[in-house]
Image (tube, rainbow, N blue to C red):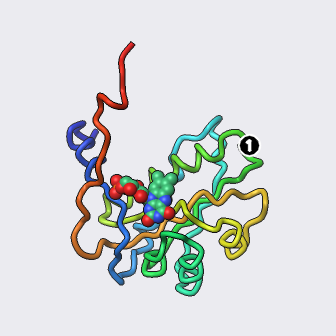
Amino acid sequence: MINPEEFLAFLKERRSIRSYLDKVIPDNEVEMILEAGRWAPSASNKQPWEFIVIKNKEILREISKKAFYGKHIKRAPLAIAIVGKIKENPNYYTQDTSFASMNMMLMAWRLGIGTCWTGALEREAVKEMLGLDEADYLLTILPMGYIKGNIPQPTQRKNLNQISREM
Ligand SMILES: Cc1cc2nc3c(=O)[nH]c(=O)nc-3n(C[C@H](O)[C@H](O)[C@H](O)COP(=O)(O)O)c2cc1C
């Protein structure tokens, strides 16, 4: 098992990365990232998700145009679209897919691959590009690539005493 202090340090080291090297991510690493998503918890273990690996530069460019703060997407060697299958877990598909996305981001980070959650997105337009339908919820697009330049400084966090309490 991983040493707890090292694990906490690992969690703290992760950053959202918006600058990527123009370097192919090998298939075995992409597969490890997908595997990390596959092993995320889900309500009633329904696994209501689909992960779409997008390598097509033109599609990445088009998605980038539909992201309000996602110009970096077009510079990523690939992105993974995380899709919730609404009918498969109607009450929990957002939570389930969110856990999958976190697992993938952490696996990627361990591989030296930066990712960035995309929230501000014209979802309907991107869904159409990906051939999704109304029973699909596009949670996020996770662009990913080896980190270009320096790892950004940590973003600020609230203090524990501001956000936790005992009873
Ligand atoms: C739900 C959600 C939506 C986000 N949307 C975007 C986004 O649209 N564009 C972007 O560049 N970063 C986005 N981020 C990344 C956050 O800005 C980032 O996680 C936050 O500033 C903390 O920085 P860190 O991830 O480096 O710790 C999003 C993160 C989350 C969790």
Residue for point 38% across, 73% down: 145
* Kind of residue at disc 1: Pro
In the image, residue 40 sits, relative to residue 81, either above or below, namely: above
- Name, please, the residue furthest toward the top: 167
- Across and down, in percent, residue 117 comes to 47, 60
Residue for badge 1: 90
**Label 1 CB, ligand 1: below 8 Å?**
no
In the image, residue 79 sits, relative to residue 3, either above or below, namely: below
Q: Is residue 89 left or right of residue 32?
A: right
- Across and down, in percent, residue 36 comes to 46, 53
Q: Which quadrant holds the C terminus?
A: top left
In the image, residue 138 sits, relative to residue 72, either above or below, namely: above
- Across and down, in percent, residue 86 comes to 73, 50
In the image, residue 138 sits, relative to residue 125, either above or below, namely: above
Between 120 and 79, the one lying in front of the other is: 120
Is residue 136 visible in this depiction of the protein? yes
Residue for point 38% across, 61% down: 108
Is residue 101 visible in this depiction of the protein? no
> What is the number of callouts on the image?
1
- Regarding mark 1 in the picture, which secondary structure is present there? loop
Quadrant of ligand 1 in image = bottom left
The residue carrying pointer 1 sits among few (fewer than 14), some (14 to 19) or many (20 or more) residues within 10 Å by Cα, namely: few
Residue for point 56% across, 60% down: 140
Picture quarter containing residue 63? bottom right
Q: Is residue 78 left or right of residue 161?
A: right
- Across and down, in percent, residue 72 comes to 43, 76
